[in-house]
Structures are given as C-alpha cells and as structure tokens.
Image (cartoon, rainbow, N blue to C red):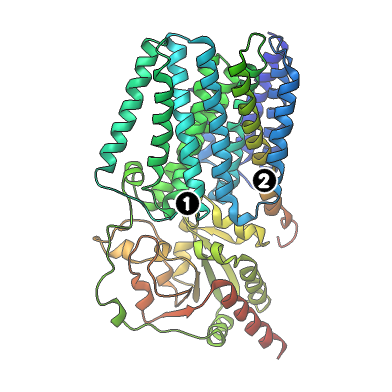
Amino acid sequence: MSVFQLLYLVAAALFILALKWMSSPSTARRGVISGEVGMLLAVVGTLMRHEIVNYEWILIALLVGSAIGVPLAIFMPMTAVPQRTAISQACGAFASALIGTAEYYRLYPHGFTMGALAVEILLGFLTTTASLMAFGKLNEMLPGRPIVFKGQNFFNLGLLLAAVIIGVMLVVNPGNSFLFPIFVGLALVFGILLIIPIGGADMPTVIALLNSYAGLSACAMGFALDNKLLIISGALDGSSGFILSIIMCRAMNRSFTNVLFGGFGQLQTSTAGTEAKPVRSASPEEAAQILEDARSVVVIPGYGMAVAQAQHKIRELHDALTKKGVDVKFAIHPVAGRMPGHMNVLLAEADVPYDKLIEMEDINPELGMTDVALIVGANDIVNPAAENDPTSPIAGMPILAAYKARTVMIIKRGMSAGFAGIDNELYYRPNTLMLFGDAKSFVSSLVKEIGAAVHA
Amino acid sequence: MLAAFLGFELIRRVSPLLHTPLMSLTNAIASISVVGAILISGDKDATTLSRVLGFIAVVSATTNLVSGYLITDRMLKMFRKREPGKK
C-alpha cells in the first residue's frame, strides 16, 4: 500500500470520527478539528501522488479558494448561516460537476465509469443551480413564496426524464459528445425548477436534501475516478443530508414528495370573518408585569426572531428574569427558522446557555405547568389547528403546545398569517395576549421595564 | 454502502441542537471533491480544457472547504463558551 492510500484511509477514519464527535456539544469542536486534519491529509496525500505534476496551478487555485472562503466565513453574520450554507453547497457541487465534465472530455469513458460520471454530473449541476436558487430565496433576493404554474410537476418530471434518457444514451455511446451540453443544460434547468415551487418554510428540508445530493455527487465521482476516499466521504455526506431531511419532514408531518412537489401555502385563502374576532393586546408595561409575576417562562422563538435580530435582546430578557428568580427556558421546534437547528445557533450566538434550549418532545409535557409562554416571531409551529383541525393544511404536524400554558404572549408585527397562509386560532384564545411590534424593540422595552422594576 | 450505513447511524444520534453545525460540517466534507479536482487538473496528460475546468473546480471546492470549516468552528465556539459559565 502506497503512502497516499494510507493517508486516504486515515482521512476517511477521521471523517467518521468527526461525525461521531458532532453528536455532543462538548466533543463537537474536536470533531471539526478531526475533519480538518482529515481533509488536510487527503489533500496532501493527493498532491503526493506521482501522476500529479502540475503544482503551480493547483497551489494558485487553493490560494484563490481560501481567499474567497475565509472572508465568507468570518464576515458572515450568524443570521445568514442558511444562505452561506446554500452558497457554499453550490460551490462544492459546481466543483464536482466540473470535474465530471473534464473527465468526460478527457477520456470519453465507457460502461460503468460513464454511468457514474453521468450521475455525478447530473447531481452536480442540479445541486449547483438549486443551491443558488435556495440562496436567492433565503437572502430574499427572490420571492420566498412558491412560484407555481400549471402542469409544473409534469414539466419537471419530463425534464428529469429527458435528462436521464440523454444520460443513458451517453452511457451507451459516449462518443455522442453533442449530447453532452444538452445533458448539462437539462440538469441546470431542472435544478432551478426544482426549487422555485418550494416555499421559504420548507427550506430546511431542501437544504438538507441538497447537501445529500452534493455528497452523492462526490460519491459518484469516487466511483468514476476509482477513488475510495471520495466514495466514503461522499456516502457519509449523502446519508447525513438524507437523514436530516427526513427528520425535517417528520417534524412537519409531510412526506418528501409533498415537500418537493407540493407548493405549499397558495392552497389557502384566509378564512372569512377573521377580522371580526376579538384579540386582546397588551402594552410592554403590562407584559413585563406578567413576566415578573410568573414563576416559569418558556420562550418560543421562530423565524421572526431571526429577521428582527432579536436574539441578543431575548438573552437580556432571560438574564433580567433569571435574576428575579423566574425560571426561563427556550423551546425549540425542529423546523423553526430556515434551516435545521437555526434557532439554536442564533441563541447560542447571543450567549444563551445551551442547556436552556429544550427540544419539542421534552418541553411539551412541561408547557402545561408553565405560567407564561412567550412566542417571538413564530406562528405555524404553535398553531393548535395542527392538533385539532383535521382539515387544516398543517394537520398532524407536531407543534409546541404553547396553548397549554396559563398565559400565552405573542410578539408579532401584525395579525398576518404565517408561512402556511393559515389563520392561527391561538391568537383568539382568552388566555392569549398579543404584543404588537417589532420583536427586537418590543423585547428591549420589556427588558427596560423589568430592569426598572428591579431598581425601584 | 458501508459508509452510507455508518453515516446513518452516526447522524441519528446527533442532537437537533447541533444540526446547523452538523450541516456545515458535512457540507465541508463534501468538498472532498477537491481531491478529484486536483487529480484532474494536475494530471500529466491533462488537456487544456480539463486543466481549466480542474482549476475552477479546485477554486470552488476550496472555497467551500475553507469557509465550511471556519464557520462550523465559529458556531461551535459559541456553544462552547459558557459551558464552564452558567453550569
């Protein structure tokens, strides 16, 4: 066994360890370091292979890539993590697609290799454009609402079918190089069309799924180039992305096909007579009073908190209330925000201790004994319709049972419906107080009120 | 196949608390394609086309790699900081 093969083996082992260590916050950073070392070994090992002769260009490329990557990582605000992941994914997928292309024009390979190559190229280009579209949606450069047109699913499937057929033709007869650009084009277009009908709230699932595609593409590349390290890490990545998207789907009680083909949210027109129902609202002073008198408070953050950048203020609120002896916890719904674990990262950025972040299954039994549930910019994930209205589009979706709390306070800019486009009956319950205003400024006035009371 | 199974088992045990860093880590691992990119562009008998494509591929894979690892680390640093702090 030559040196580079040994290094590859070690690198693969390090990747596996990296994922293993990611399972707990206390060992997670070790996991990242092990992943970094693994990657370093893989690159060094590759550079040492004797068929590599052309060093200058590789080094320049590595430097250019780092020069783009480092600022991307360091200057990106934490709220933009979903976007960054999407764009970074696009880069990775683009790389593997290009490699596939280069390999095709170099060798015109046959049989199995060509098959693997076709898979790699299809997934690579598809993921590139799909990730770019996801980036655009997350960054609000494109409308987050699903864009649908009649017969879209048929059109998309037809497109995919066409791409697959051309792919098969290329495998059968790789000499048909005029088909190749068509193949690439179809993959690119399919990537775009795949994402436009998917709405903002489904992005966590989609990003996880794209992650999986990028991994599978790398895995296919491993088969095409006969490189075991690529196969192993690609498969690791592919399966992890896949299982994450399954977790996300389950958290919304929706199937894969539903997310991919379901344009969600345009089904609904808001129910008539909405305006007639009375809601109770409260001023910051009143709300602060209720919070101070409570013994236990559960904060439920949603995408609205991320938009308003309210996480630091919420931590101040947490500190002020904790100082007064109030037990404050955070309830995290698996799909709150725009990517898996989005809320956790934001709250961690604001220095909220992570043992205060409680998962849905663990907090729900407690909510019945909670004095105040404070909902910040979340909507569908606390909508009781999911449990008691079988006709609701979100019926069956697991929710945080905020309505069980003695008092429910909802910070919201207005009465508009959430992403799913449905009314939330929680707003009209007698124990619900609506706190209208921007999440950030409202929470800071709450903090001010509570702080003032401490000094008085 | 084995790796896929292993990946499944490993990920299932990751707490949702860490899903975001996990995603960016696997994202960074996906940039293992840099290996393939180097192989293509550095090969002895690489054509100009494959060299150019390989070059671009190395650049974008490295971008993915570097930013992926750095941001994962940045995120985890935040999770870590107050471990000794408030119990």
Residue at 61 percent of width and 13 percent of height: B47
For the C terminus of chain A, the image quarter is: bottom right
Are circles 1 and 2 on residues that touch, CB within 8 Å?
no
In the rendered image of this protein, does residue B11 appear above or below residue A427?
above
Chain of the residue under the numbered disc 1 shown in the image = A
Which residue corresponds to the image point at 45% horizontal and 29% vertical from the top-left? A123
Evaluate whether residue A130 shows in this view: yes
* Relative depth, front residue between A447 and A400: A447
Q: Mark 2 Cα within 10 Å, few/some/many (few <14, many 20+)?
A: many
Residue A350 sits in which quadrant?
bottom right
User: For mark 1, what is the residue?
Assistant: A137
In the drawing, does residue A449 fall left or right of residue A270? right
**Residue that badge 2 annotates:** A72
Please indicate whether residue A276 sits to the left or right of residue A291 in the image: left
Question: Disc 2 residue type?
Answer: Leu
- In this view, the residue farthest toward the bottom is A456
Q: Determine the CA span between mark 1 and mark 2.
A: 19 Å
Q: Please report, as a chain letter, where disc 2 is located.
A: A
Residue A244 drawn above or below residue A232: below
